[in-house]
Amino acid sequence: QKEVEQNSGPLSVPEGAIASLNCTYSDRVSQSFFWYRQYSGKSPELIMSIYSNGDKEDGRFTAQLNKASQYVSLLIRDSQPSDSATYLCAVNGGVSGGSYIPTFGRGTSLIVHP
Amino acid sequence: KAGVTQTPRYLIKTRGQQVTLSCSPISGHRSVSWYQQTPGQGLQFLFEYFSETQRNKGNFPGRFSGRQFSNSRSEMNVSTLELGDSALYLCASSPGLAEVYEQYFGPGTRLTVT
């Protein structure tokens, strides 16, 4: 059973701080990694994808991937109250008939307080 | 470019009935995946269709089925509804296979089984 683990939180940070969200996965052969944001009552929306070890930056967001340690993280710089949401980590993993299926973590709730 | 659309948005059914949900992907996207989201289990993969063929299937009973049409629109069917099927059903489209590419989610269909 392929697993993607996230701390459920809530993670509370002050406005302007850096929020650090972490995700670990169990399947060593996973190749594609994604972060989604989900506001309460809404559907998930894509923030970033990352495929190679190292950092990938997009605006205030930085995704970090370490395949050897099997973890993915998301840093949000200059956090804003509008960043308050649940952040889902998704990993290409879980073999089904020879193909891989996307597996999502349960999500980390982030609260950015003014 | 228009996003992923799902119909209906809300549905109330009685135990034992069947239901069909519809999803229209982003124009040009050939992959459509379906997910079930509940507070207790998080986001669970149901199946993926690509070019009218089911590629992958999650760990759900045979009561859950789907299909994809030549225009990439997809339908999901649940027969003999159970109370535990109450959930948010999300459709996601990808420019390529979901195991590799990012996914874009529709607004979801909220199904309540009484």
Image (cartoon, grey):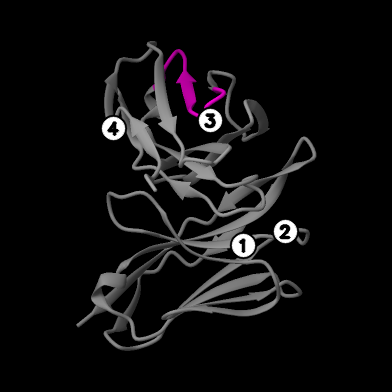
Q: Secondary structure at mark 1?
A: strand
Instruction: Give the residue at mark 4.
Output: B9
> How many angstroms separate mark 2 from mark 4 (CA)?
33 Å
The residue at 72%/60% (across/down) is A31
Query: Split into 4 quadrants, where in the image is the C terminus of chain A?
Result: bottom left
> How many angstroms separate mark 2 from mark 1 (CA)?
8 Å
> How many angstroms separate mark 3 from mark 1 (CA)?
25 Å
Which residue is at the far left? A114
Where does residue B4 sit, x and y in percent of width and height?
40, 41
- Magenta stretch bounds: B68-82
Instruction: Give the residue at mark 2.
Output: A30
Q: Secondary structure at mark 3?
A: loop
Instruction: Give the residue at mark 3.
Output: B72
Instruction: Give the residue at mark 1.
Output: A33
Marks 2 & 1, CB-CB < 8 Å contact: yes
Q: Is residue A79 left or right of residue A63?
A: left
